[in-house]
Image: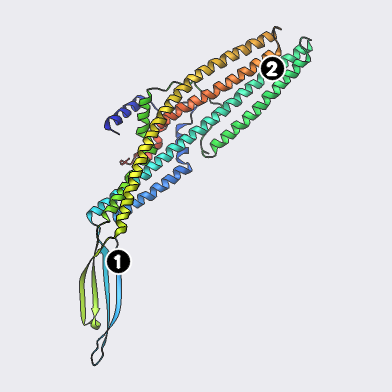
Amino acid sequence: MTILRYLSVACLGLLITPLHAGYLPDPAAAIAAVQAAPAVQQARAELTAKALTRESLQHGREEWSLSAEAAQRRVETVSRDRYPEWGLALTRPVRLPQRAAADRALGGALAAHAEASLDEALHESGRELLKLWFDWLGEAGQSRLWDAQVGLAETQLAAVKARIRLGEAPRAEGVNAEAALAQARLQRMQALARAQQARASLSAPYPGLPVPADPELPAPAMPAGTADAHVEAVLAHNHEWMRARREAEWLQAQARVLAQRRGADPSVGVFYRNEADGGEHVLGIHLGLTLPGAARRSDHQAAEALSAAAQAAADRIEQRLRLEARADFEAAQALSDAWQQADAAARALEEAARLAARAYELGEGSLDSVLLARRLAMEGRLQAWQVQVAALAAEARLSLDAHRLWPQMYAESEAHPQL
């Protein structure tokens, strides 16, 4: 990504305040819940392991080797003398400066890849939290709508019974009103069960997340900015792409390490020998070379191929993310428009149901017309509610992907300058 692109995305982020609304989870509680998720804990443990591996590579794995020997020398003379002998040797491989630099680069690349993996785990956990949250919002809202529908059905049944007592309505209308009330109660029970299940699904992975009793949803807003600006904002912060790039860098660093190992491995040491039963003392320096074979060349070539494959995978992920980010932005726009249409249709159906009920009260309509109008109004309101929840969920996901929602969630990894 060019410097100009980073500057444009940074300016866009300054103009857009972090998204926070009452219908969304509390930011502090949401961040704590995400950071406590099992996938995040696993990624954090892997980061700790990679940090220790980086320290190991910085120190080097060349270590001193101590060896000892004992022998007996027999001199074939007339006296056939025998002399006990022994020796000690201390040797260590030598890490050349180029190989040390390659090892340090590999350690840094491993740690950077682990940090990118932690960020990806945080982001995916945040996405999962939002999905479960809006699933619960949708089901809880439907349960409340069916509560209201049951109240209307109960009021309607009472009015019908009153008319029957006055002889203004046949008993069949009472049966129809009771059937409508029974159906509404059944739908309410089913909606309540779905809402309880959705809440349990949310609380299971995020037990510490507070869930409000009756959140109010605002009207969905049209996404701000343009699709191109959103795509650049997403790519500037996308952790899947960052992780793929870090993986390519890690494999390239590993290939450079293996390239350095294609040369000879020098070793140096000292030795001491006590010979001829202490009559001779030998102190010397040992120099050695481990000559490489064909396996090292194959290992280097394999690492180069894996690095090229990882870079191609990163490029493919970038292309996919560009398409997905644009599609998400356009889908959010479409859902906002769809909600306006669905809400207008629901309001019209509700007005028609109100007029039908009023006409029935005045003796100018039939109960069947009232029940049909209310059923259509309920279907329209349920559909509008579902579109509203989907539009708000799309808006929240856009903000999460662009790091406008819960940006403090990544404070742990942003403390590392290599990211």
Q: What residue lies at 51% left-to-right and 20% top-to-bottom? A: 339
| Rendered position, 265 above or below 350 | below
Instruction: Relative to 175, say whether 325 is above or below.
Output: below
Label pair 1/2, CB-CB below 8 angstroms: no
The amino acid marked with disc number 2 is: Thr
199 or 229: nearer the viewer: 229
Q: In the image, residue 397 lies at what x, y percent?
A: 45, 30
- Report the coloring of the rendering: rainbow
Residue appearing at x 36%, y 39% in the figure? 314
Q: Is residue 328 left or right of residue 262?
A: right
Where is residue 72 shown, x and y percent of the image?
29, 82
317 displayed left or right of 190 = left
The residue wearing badge 1 is 65
Q: Position of residue 312 (x, y in %)?
A: 35, 40
- Quadrant showing the C terminus: top left
Q: Circle 2 — which element?
A: helix
Give percent across and percent down for residue 116: 37, 41
Amino acid type at circle 1 is Ser
| Picture quarter with the N terminus | top left
Snapshot quadrant of residue 153: top right
Which residue is found at the position 57% from the left and 34% from the top? Answer: 199
Relative side of 359 to 94, left or right: right
- Residue beneath disc 2: 155
Q: Is residue 336 left or right of residue 111?
A: right
Vertical arrangement, residue 242 with respect to residue 67, above or below: above
Mark toward the viewer: 1 or 2: 1
